[in-house]
């Protein structure tokens, strides 16, 4: 029987090595893992380390669904994301998640920032073509920074660039409708699912906050998304303080969401 | 000489009074500040930032 495809980002525990984390993640029931934004935690940019990562994934019976790359607008983004794409291709990871800007910025900077993002993406398109890896631009603070993602994706080719939906970011100031998925659902390549409790208190396990998961999963179900139910949750504000219990509960919730996203008869991807 | 001693004593007395008044004022302010902090401890926490992962 195929298992429900579920994933969790390593960002919940940068203090523990991947040698420790992958078996824990696998034991909790996850089928996939995604690498968080702190590259030194996994050192995937080091060519020699990539073989170790492949072995670790194999040993833990895990697959990797995404890598969180550096921001598109930072100096050196092109070379860093090119190396990230090479690592992703080696590790059989289909998507690299990126932020297009700082979490928020002044609206007067919009046009200049859009040009920077489009220029970097234009240079990344051949990299995506060569490696077969796609880049998913993530929504950040609602407002200009998320509008930048929407505007950039409107101009970028869908074969190489898509959308990463972060539920905690989208629901800042919520609960509110999931209109962002109405707009960008057809470009959805990656999920950063987590729940939100109140201002500044989020990225908790689904069910711990105010997000209406039935409605959200319905939106995802009507989108182009075909990857695992992927969580980006942290322990900072979660009620689950023990790491093993946190992982167990997170996986349980991800498995509950799975049929809501892919249908009751979904038998794994 | 006596005049000098008396003068010194008078000064000491004045300083002592001033010191005492200052101490009273400081203690009074201290309790006011403590009460203010106790009442507003939740309200004046440094604003947290949104998690930008």
Image (spheres, helix red, strand yellow):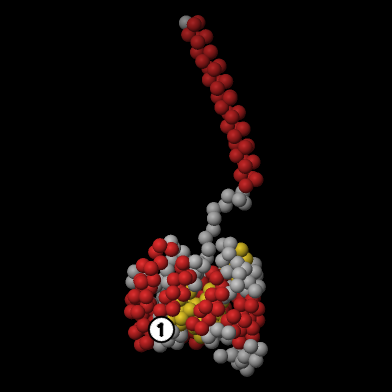
Q: Residue at 58% across / 32% down in the picture? A: B26
Residues A43 and A37: in front is A37
Please identify the quarter of the rendering in which residue B32 is found.
top right
Asked which secondary structure carries label 1, the reply is: loop
How many numbered dots are placed on residues in this image?
1
Task: Quickly name the residue at label 1.
Answer: A157
Chain letter of disc 1 in the image: A
Q: Residue at 43% across / 81% down in the picture? A: A161
Residues A236 and A60: in front is A236
Q: Is residue A244 visible?
A: no
Q: Residue at 58% across / 69% down in the picture? A: A171
- Crowding near the residue tagged with mark 1, few <14, some 14–19, many ≥20 C-alpha atoms within 10 Å: few
User: Residue A96's x, y, as percent?
Assistant: 44, 79
User: Residue B39's x, y, as percent?
Assistant: 65, 45
Residues A238 and A97: in front is A97
Please identify the quarter of the rendering in which residue A49 is found.
bottom left
Q: Is residue A64 left or right of residue B34?
A: left
Q: Is residue B2 visible?
A: yes
User: Residue A60's x, y, as percent?
Assistant: 53, 84
User: Residue A79's x, y, as percent?
Assistant: 33, 76
Q: Residue furthest top?
A: B2
Please determine whether, in this image, residue A138 is positioned above or below residue A265. Answer: above
Q: Residue at 39% across / 71% down in the picture? A: A114
């Amino acid at each position: 029987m195929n298992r429900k495809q579920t994933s969790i980002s390593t960002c919940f525990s940068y203090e523990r090595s991947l040698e420790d984390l992958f078996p824990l993640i696998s034991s909790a029931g996850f089928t996939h893992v995604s690498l968080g934004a702190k590259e030194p935690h996994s050192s995937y940019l080091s060519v020699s380390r990539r073989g170790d990562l492949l072995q670790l994934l194999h040993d833990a019976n895990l697959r990797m669904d995404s890598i969180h790359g550096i921001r598109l607008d930072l100096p050196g983004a092109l070379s860093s994301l090119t190396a990230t794409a090479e690592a992703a291709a080696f590790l059989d990871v289909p998507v690299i998640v990126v932020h297009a800007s700082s979490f928020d910025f002044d609206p007067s900077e919009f046009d200049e920032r859009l040009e920077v993002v489009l220029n970097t993406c234009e240079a990344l398109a051949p990299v995506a073509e060569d490696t077969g890896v796609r880049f998913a631009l993530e929504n950040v603070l609602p407002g200009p920074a998320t509008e930048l993602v929407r505007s950039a994706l409107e101009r970028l080719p869908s074969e190489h660039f898509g959308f990463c939906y972060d539920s905690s970011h989208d629901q800042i100031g919520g609960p509110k409708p999931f209109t962002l998925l109405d707009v960008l659902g057809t470009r959805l390549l990656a999920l950063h699912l987590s729940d939100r409790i109140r201002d500044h208190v989020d990225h908790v396990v689904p069910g711990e906050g105010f997000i209406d998961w039935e409605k959200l999963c319905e939106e995802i179900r009507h989108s182009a998304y075909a990857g695992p139910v992927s969580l980006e949750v942290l322990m900072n504000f979660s009620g689950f303080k023990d790491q093993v219990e946190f992982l167990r509960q997170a996986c349980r919730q991800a498995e509950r969401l799975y049929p809501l996203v892919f249908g009751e008869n979904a038998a794994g991807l | 000489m006596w005049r000098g001693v008396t003068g010194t004593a008078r000064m000491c007395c004045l300083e002592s009074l001033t010191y005492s008044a200052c101490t009273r004022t400081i203690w009074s302010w201290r309790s006011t500040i403590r009460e203010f902090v106790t009442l507003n401890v939740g309200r004046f926490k440094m604003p947290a930032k949104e998690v930008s992962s």
